[in-house]
Image: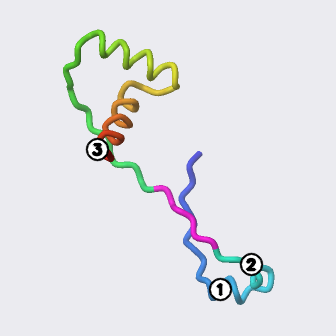
């Protein structure tokens, strides 16, 4: 079950707390909220779609998730 992230503690509050005053502050990357999914129709050759399906299934992905990852990788290059 996904829970919302708590509000970050202010460094002054951490330093004032006797249980954490000698701790070390660390920055962590918070996950970004996922964008709403939108259904689209695409046309692919049947052999490519079959290959995508086998590849994705072998890795525990849906074809849609695989295509989204592939698109993001391509855009990033």
In this orientation, which residue lies closer to the viewer: 16 or 51?
Answer: 51
Mark 1, residues whose alpha carbon is within 10 Å: few (<14), some, or many (≥20)? few
Given the current orientation, which residue lies at the most extreme front position?
A: 77
Q: Nearer the viewer, residue 43 or 7?
A: 43
Q: Which residue is mark 1?
A: 13
Q: Position of residue 6 (x, y in %)?
A: 57, 66
Q: Which residues are magenta?
A: 26-31
- Residue 75, numbered label: 3
Instruction: Name the secondary structure under disc 1.
Output: helix
Q: Quadrant of residue 53?
A: top left
Compared to 46, does 60 lie above or below? below
Q: Nearer the viewer, residue 15 or 54?
A: 54
- The alpha-carbon separation of the residues under discs 1 and 2 comes to 12 Å
Residue named by callout 2: 23
Q: Along the horizontal axis of the image, is 75 left or right of 28?
A: left
Instruction: Give the number of the mark in front: 2 or 3.
Output: 3
Q: Main secondary structure of the magenta part?
A: loop
21 to 27, vertically: above or below? below
Q: Earlier in the sequence, mark 2 or mark 3?
A: 2
Residue contact between numbered discs 2 and 3, judged by CB atoms under 8 Å: no
Snapshot colouring: rainbow
Comparing marks 1 and 2, which lies closer to the viewer?
2
Q: How many marks?
A: 3
User: What residue lies at 34% left-to-right and 42% top-to-bottom?
Assistant: 72
Q: Considering the numbered disc 2 on the image, is that residue within a helix, a strand or a loop? A: loop
């Amino acid at each position: 079950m996904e829970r919302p992230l708590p509000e970050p503690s202010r460094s002054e509050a951490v330093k004032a707390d006797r249980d954490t005053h000698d701790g070390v502050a660390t920055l962590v990357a918070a996950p970004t909220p996922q964008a709403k999914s939108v259904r689209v129709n695409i046309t692919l050759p049947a052999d490519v779609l079959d290959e995508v399906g086998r590849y994705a299934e072998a890795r525990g992905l849906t074809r849609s998730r695989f295509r989204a990852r592939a698109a993001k990788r391509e855009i990033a290059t």
